[in-house]
Image (tube, rainbow, N blue to C red):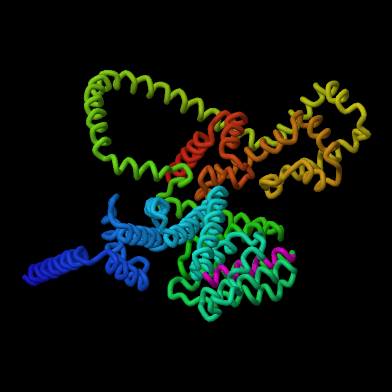
Amino acid sequence: MHNRIFILSLLVVQSCVTTATLSIKNNWNDMSSEALLRRGRAFAAKNLKSDSAMMCLTIVSNRYYDGMNAREMEICAYAMSDLACLYTYGKLDYPQAYRYLIKAQTIAEDNGFERVSAIIDNNLGNLYAIYGNQFDRSGMKKKALALYRSSYRKAEQIGYDELQLSAFTNLFGEDNNFPLKDFRGIFKTDISPNTSYARHARTLYKAIEAQRRGDYIRARTCFLHLPKTIDTRYAPESYIIGAYMRVANTYHIEGNHREATTWLLKARQLAVETSDIVSQIAVSRKLIDEYRHRNMATAADSCRMSYYTLKDSLSTAFGLNNIEEMDFRHDLQIAEDKSQQLMMEKRIHRILIYMGLLFLVSASVFMFILVRKNRKLKSSNRKLYENNLQLLKADEEQKALRKSYVAADRTADSKKYASSNLTEESKEQLFQNIQAIMDQSDWICRKEFSLNQLAQLVGSNKTYVSQVINEKYGVSFSILLGNNRIKEACRRINDEEQYGQYTLEGISESVGFKSKATFNSSFKRLIGLTPSEYQSMARLRKANQDRSDRG
């Protein structure tokens, strides 16, 4: 009885809430666009994730149509821009934010709304910068910088001081290499020095100026003061994290990698405490570099694994695609031509019905052939995988085979290097030194590792090193390096405990390959399997071992 009363009470409350929500929405629909825009901004000022703010701004955005008066068009463009900010920072839906910004940008450009256009350039720059930094897209970063400069220039021309200061801060937050003299406009006398935007931008200017002239103590003082100059109720920790990273960068420039690491660890700790995954990724990327400079391979590997895990989780959580490859203008055009699209879908549907009958007839034959081929392929892949395991365990035998190969082809090599002054004893010693370096994954897995670096490490020159590699291994340096990286990739794929969280792209980057395509082709050439096939075999083998252990 009590349960029934409780359930009825909940239904009544839910009904009341639904009725109240519909009533509010109906009231908002009756409001003017300008009043509704102000209300949406008020809700957003209290909470960037506010559903009420989303509803208000969405209602205004949806009122847009071609031919409405200029003022209403401008209000709709403002609402779309504000809505994009909520999707960027509140809902974390970058593609949706991009769609609203592109539509607002089109409206602003077609109707000469200079103020809206300047704001959208700045917001688009933020979107490109966030995506480019977290997913390492250099093209996006360049677009962000161009948009920030455009926003700064437009804001300066129309006297929009607050946006001018904001664009300057965003621009130099991404890249400190622009000529400072081009941005002296932030110090013009008609901009009040008491506003938070002015204090923040001018302090940043002084910090960068001090850093460029080598006054790192002054620069660090200014950077640490930056969070105190900005008045914000939303995520103030992000400004502190940014300040810590800037301080770490000054120590990095000085070559003091210990202090740089200390400040980056402070930044990471604050990012973890505030669940700021975006900042955690940015800090982890910097920490890997500092650990490398300090020759802390274990710490660098641990940080790298954390970096790839965070990066993968961010991609999965956002459901992101490559914005560079997505044509949102085209999507919007398709949406406007919806009736045409529906007609096409009906035609396709009829064709699919006719094709379905043919598919049912041929499906059985196709599946039979496919299953048979798949069994043969699995058997072949299993043999290749087992052979590879034996080769990895028999590295000493491989060395002997290489020596015998070199002996058989010594005549050709002796002609190629007839003018060399290396004695056989020197060659053997240099070969041993080269082998010692090539056996160290910490060296060969660095993307920038080159023949010159190898020569420096073994205390020789690249001509002699190249000669010894050709004579002893029978291959060039690039092939030798690629083969060793592939072997290390195999070892990491087999090591489920330490590298089980890595994607194949993560494995590829971790062993030094700059291109996934190069990694795939090199892997297939050397091992006989694709990386994904090899990974499947490794997981199947581990599963069989686990079942055997339990049995």
Q: Position of residue 100 (x, y in %)?
A: 37, 54
Depth check, front residue: 18 or 62: 62
Question: In the image, what residue occupies the spot 75% across and 45% down?
Answer: 437
Residue 316, position as x, y percentages in the image: 42, 51
Residue occupying the far bottom of the picture: 194
| The N terminus: image quadrant | bottom left
Asked which quadrant contains residue 199, the reply is bottom right
In the picture as drawn, the residue positioned furthest to the left comes out as 1
- Whether 486 is drawn above or below 144: the answer is above
From the viewer's perspective, is 479 left or right of 47?
A: right
Q: Residue at x 70, y 71 (%)?
A: 210
Camera sees residue 306: no
| Tally of marks | 0
From this view, report whether residue 222 is shown above or below residue 275: below
Image coordinates of residue 487 in percent, x first then y, are 63, 38
Write down the region rendered in magenta: 239-254
Decide which of 169, 408 is in the foreground and name it.
169
Residue 532 seen in the figure:
yes
**In the figure, 34 relative to 70: above or below?**
below
The main secondary structure of the magenta stretch is helix
Q: Answer above or below: position of 50 versus 355.
A: below
Is residue 250 a member of the stretch shown in magenta? yes
Q: Position of residue 168 (x, y in %)?
A: 56, 65
| Residue 490 counted in the magenta span | no
- For the point 34% across and 20% down, which residue is it? 366
Q: Is residue 231 left or right of residue 215?
A: left
Q: Of residues 288 and 329, which is closer to you in this image?
A: 329
In the figure, residue 349 lies in which quadrant? top left
| Quarter of the figure with the C terminus | top left
